[in-house]
Image: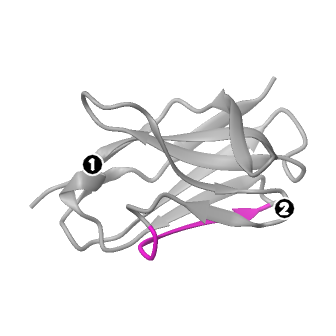
Amino acid sequence: QVQLVESGGGLVQPGGSLRLSCAASGSIFSGNAMGWYRQAPGKERELVARITSGGSTNYADSVKGRFTISRDNAKNTVYLQMNSLKPEDTAVYYCSRGTYYSSSYYPHYWGQGTQVTVSS
């Protein structure tokens, strides 16, 4: 059974940084694509960043140049480094494991989410 556990959320001032972590267990980690989504109140869940098993990354336009997704296969962990945070980045952030084909990412498993609040 796949388990994904996020950590690292919290309250940060605009312009600040946070690093989210997602520890995966229950299956082989290195062969899967991973993604970070977020959902703000009243809005649909959106894909923020994804990383393939080979390390290829892609980002939503709203976070390009500010967020970086990475993975450590030895630790079965995926990270989301978030810099220059803005109030509009406030949301619950979810880690996911999925598949990547035909230039698209398809999530299959979800973590429980971690709250990120950007406010002064």
The label shown at residue 74 is 2
Picture coordinates of residue 94 (x, y %)? 51, 39
The answer to whether residue 99 is left or right of residue 84 is right
Q: Position of residue 78 (x, y in %)?
A: 66, 56
* Residue at the spot 30% in from the left edge and 54% down from the top edge: 89
**Residue 59 appears in view:** yes
Q: Residue at x 90, y 50 (%)?
A: 31
> Callout 1: 10 Å neighbours few (<14), some, many (20+)?
many
Q: How much space separates mark 2 and mark 1, taking CA atoms? A: 30 Å
Q: Position of residue 110 (x, y in %)?
A: 62, 30
Label pair 2/1, CB-CB below 8 angstroms? no
Is 34 left, or right, of 16 in this rendering? right
Q: Which residue is mark 1?
A: 90
Q: Is residue 81 left or right of residue 44?
A: right
**Amino acid on which the number 1 mark rests in the picture:** Thr
Could you say whether the residue bearing mark 1 is in a helix, strand or loop? loop
Q: Dot 2: few (<14), some (14–19), or many (≥20) neighbours within 10 Å?
A: few
Q: Residue at x 63, y 48 (%)?
A: 35
Q: Look at the image and name its color scheme.
A: one colour
In this rendering, position of residue 25 left or right of residue 109: right
Q: Was residue 3 drawn as part of the magenta stretch in this picture?
A: no
**Is residue 69 magenta-colored?**
yes
Q: Which residues are magenta?
A: 64-72
